[in-house]
Amino acid sequence: MKVFDIALKDLLRALRNTFFLAFGLVFPLLMAGIFHFAFGGLGDDGGVPQVRIQFASLDETGPEYGHFSAGEMLFQLLDSEELADLLQVTPSLDIESARAAVDNQEADVAVIVPAGFTAAVFDPDGRASIELYQDPTLMLGPAIVGDIVSSFVDTFAGSKITAGLAYDLIAEQGAAATEETLQDVSSRYAHWAIELKKEAGANSLIEFRSPSGDDKPAGGAVSMVALVMAGMMVFYVFFTGAASAQSILQEEEDGTLSRLFTTPTPQSTILGGKFISIFVLLVFQVVVLLAVSSLFFEIAWGDPLPVALATLGLVVVAASFGIFITSLLKDTRQTGIVYGGVMTVAGMIGMSSVFTGGASGPMDTVSLIVPQGWGVLAWRLLLEGGGLSDVLFPVAVTLALGVGFFVIGVLKFKKRFA
Amino acid sequence: MRILDLALKDLTQLIRDWKAAFFLVVMPILFTLLFGFVFSGSGGGDDPRLPVGILDHDGGNALGLYLIELLDAADSVRPVILSGEIAAVEQKVGDDDLIAAVIVPAGYSEQVLAGGQVPLTVIVDQSSPGGMSAQQGIQTAVTRLLGAVKSARLGAWVSTQSDEVQLTFLVEAVDRAVEAWKQPPLTVTVTQSGSIAANDAEAVYGTNNYAHSSSGMMIQFAMAGLMGAGEILVLERKSRALQRLLTTAISRAGIILGHFLAMFVMIFLQLALLVGFGQVALGVDYMREPLALLLLMVTLALWAASLGLLISVIAKTEEQVIIFSLIPMLLLSALSGAWIPLEFTGETFQTIGHFTPLAWAMDGFENIIIRGLGLESVLLPAGILLAYGALFFALAVWRFRFE
């Protein structure tokens, strides 16, 4: 029973410690909360903010084009009801003021339609280019606008190419193409292109699949918040494991450990009690983090059995790693650099797959050189809908690593206190 | 002079602690490299376009070859011809040797030329930035390929006045249409604001993946040094060294200023080292506007030193110094867009982010290194940093205790 008394004493001390409360519980939840907020929580609709567009058109129309203006058509497309949630279009009086709005960061991108754009659409030899003038610090917004404008321009370009090709082919047959014929093939092409866009949206032209071979997009189905929460949990559970093991060094320096060794309590019982308290504390930490995150951030961690397995693997490896790394230290003065530096660097490497959104790649492989990486992998697989069979391997690795760290750590402590 | 002596004493104490160097310089460099690498795409040698593999199971028939030509004409992707099994191709994408791979199924040309619709398979990680760019490039190329087929079919139909067209005639027409698509008559041109010319792409996100991570990690770790500096003050208070100092000729204001000066110099030197690393090793052009850079570094260091002074006033123990330093460091970094650009976050988050001084510091650095703007562009960020710094400094002086 003494072993449990010692474990209970250490556990109560840890739970009263503001350091544990701050870094073990509050901080991972706070960080996940920030990402929850950043990516759509607390009132935002979850999407990116509207892209602010300045639209400047020098395009002209006239009776020869049936008063049709391709520039005006582009404005109506960008300013349409369907795109209203995505784009905020402001007509600009001239090119200079459109550019100035982007320069002054009042707009994200300026769409500049050149003079004679409509003429270039109708003229068989006409060429023109729409300019997108964008803020170089932005990627997402201008890319969205670029996709829409390119698709629009390609429809006209395709119509022109079709008309040009038809003209040449008819001429090669020894005939002359009439304007009506060319207009007919152009409009047929445009109609087809519009239909094609609808089909492209339904993925009937291209089937996308992730490198892992499944149909779901890698990482795309998992919310950023869930991935960040998993990463933060692993990061801080390892941190808590190491910080809890520090009590062995602290008691050694305070002299309380040596006094305990003079009592009839065996050394193995004393150390065993301390180790148990670390394991129990980490289980408590993981359970609280899982429960609070699923409640507040609505994270679906998966089925109970694989979640329990992943928890076991994480707790075993984090506690053992803490014991192992503490066994290498001479005194508490060395803990700052190890806990603040080594644990942070190892934790960040292990978490790197979180920042890649769970994409397969070299960073994912690199993350597995630290035990944190295996912990993150198990939780990521669960978040991606993985079951028991999926998490078995990473959990087995964490358990194996945990046993290894534990054995080395215990042997070193035994030698130290012999 | 006594203020300088006190500052020098603090600095010597900090420099002697090798842990300080680790937190102040090594960790921000490691994190800069990590974040830069994570957000990087897969470029390749002289051709910076994203590599997209093509596995042609169509037996080298026309449309597979045209797709390669159209991909090669794209700005964002470049085709890499593959052979072998799909599993091996998946592995290449999984290992990031390729950003994506297109698999052309057997019979694709025949069926599409006959008017059928056969989907291509694209292996890509749609959640990665590179994957999204490649996806767009592939979609454009595929749409143009199908557009070329449609143009050819329409051209053949009006020229022969028949629905039954010989395959060779159709392929030749497709060939012409593909040629036309390589230089389409109507295009979209992208130009960038700021004084960095479009062809000077070294310092923009598109090619320099470290532009954001370098400045982001620099402003984050400007607060890491506060742990050591704050600990010195807390220890001096606990050991009553501060009280003993009051019995000397140095004034109360002198003591506070001495410690503040040490924090300022330490953070400024840290920023200078990190700017130097970013400039020389990562090619981030901080020195484009030296005066603007200097102003931003000075105001950032003043702000961080003020925060450090405030932390050392509030904290009673060394443990609290660490907590009070790390919490604002990570919280402000996350809110300010130091980790992930604010552009990717929601509107409310962006607004709240700009209540933090670090979001303005990020804006200031981006104005220099990405937008290529000058001194005028950093006046507002520097002013806001200075205002926050003055507020923290005033609070710290107000609450400063010598015992």
Image (cartoon, coloured by chain):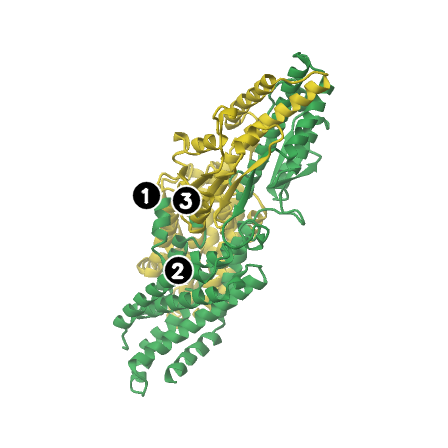
Chain colours: A yellow, B green
Q: Is residue B178 visible?
A: yes
Residue at the far left in the pictured view? B398
Say which of A383 and A210 sits in front. A210
The residue under label 3 is which amino acid type?
Val
Q: Nearer the viewer, residue A12 or A300?
A: A300
Which amino acid, by three-letter code, is at mark 1? Answer: Leu
Label 1: element kind: loop
Disc 3 or 1, which lies upstream in sequence? 1
Q: Position of residue A68 (x, y in %)?
A: 48, 26
Residue B272 falls left or right of residue B108: left
Residue carrying label 1:
A42
Identify residue for label 3.
Answer: A225
Q: Which chain does the residue under circle 1 lie in?
A: A
Residue drawn at (53%, 60%) of the image: B30
Whether A36 is drawn above or below B383: the answer is above
B106 up-or-down from B241: above or below: above
Q: Are marks 1 and 2 on the same chain?
A: no
Q: CA distance from mark 2 to mark 3?
A: 30 Å
Labels 2 and 3 within one chain? no
Q: Nearer the viewer, mark 3 or mark 1?
A: 1
Dot 2: chain letter: B
What amino acid is at disc 2? Pro
Q: Residue at x 64, y 44 (%)?
A: B97
Q: Which residue is mark 2?
A: B381
- Residue B347 has which mark? none
Residue B176 placed where, x, y %? 69, 27
**Residue A261 appears in the figure:** no
